[in-house]
Amino acid sequence: MRHQRHFESAPASRGALQIGELIADIDRVVHILNSDIATEEEQAKVFDRSQPEYPMLARTLAARRDNLRDTIAALERRLAAIYRAQLEEVSAQQQHGASKPLASQGFVIHRGTRLGTESAKRIRPSFSHLAGVARHRSSG
């Protein structure tokens, strides 16, 4: 039965990594859109969206950026749910006699995240750069 649990958590870990990569990609697009919006505003010399002279392209890009920010927020909530589930699974294993600390099981505890909660995630060495992305996102 224990072996089966290992295989159940693997897709969740893989999904968490994919979601983290997707968040990073979308965040890069948001930064590009912000730059494009600023360029359009500079060219038109209009910076207030309520002005009728505000560039239509800047309005469109701002709406797209806002939608992408909403998408990032939804993905972060989904990622937090995955981390909470993994943390609960590890806590349950520790209560049932597994005395190994989280770090020895390949989990990393993140504190002070954007969501204000603690979470744990399994990190493989080749994906450790995602932890830096998560820290960068939470500080911004």
Image (cartoon, rainbow, N blue to C red):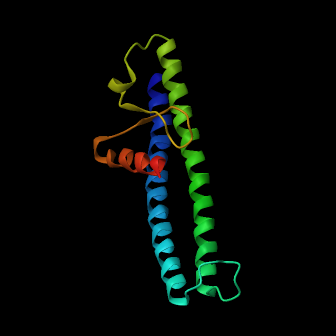
Question: Is 75 positioned to the left or the right of 99 in the image?
Answer: right
Give the number of marks. Answer: 0
User: x, y (%) of residue 107?
Assistant: 39, 31
Residue 93 versus residue 137 in the image, above or below: above
Quarter of the view holding residue 21: bottom left
Question: Which residue, as the protein is rendered here, is positioned at the far top?
Answer: 97
The residue sitting at 39% across, 32% down in the picture is: 108
User: What is the x, y in percent for residue 104?
Assistant: 32, 24
Q: Is residue 92 above or below residue 107?
A: above
Residue 42's spot in the image, x, y percent? 50, 84
Residue nearest the viewer, comparing 60 with 126: 60
Locate residue 101: give its quadrant: top left
Q: Nearer the viewer, residue 2 or 95?
A: 95
Q: Is residue 126 left or right of residue 95?
A: left
Q: Is residue 92 above or below residue 58?
A: above
Q: Nearer the viewer, residue 37 or 28?
A: 37
Tell me the residue at 58%/81% (across/down): 58
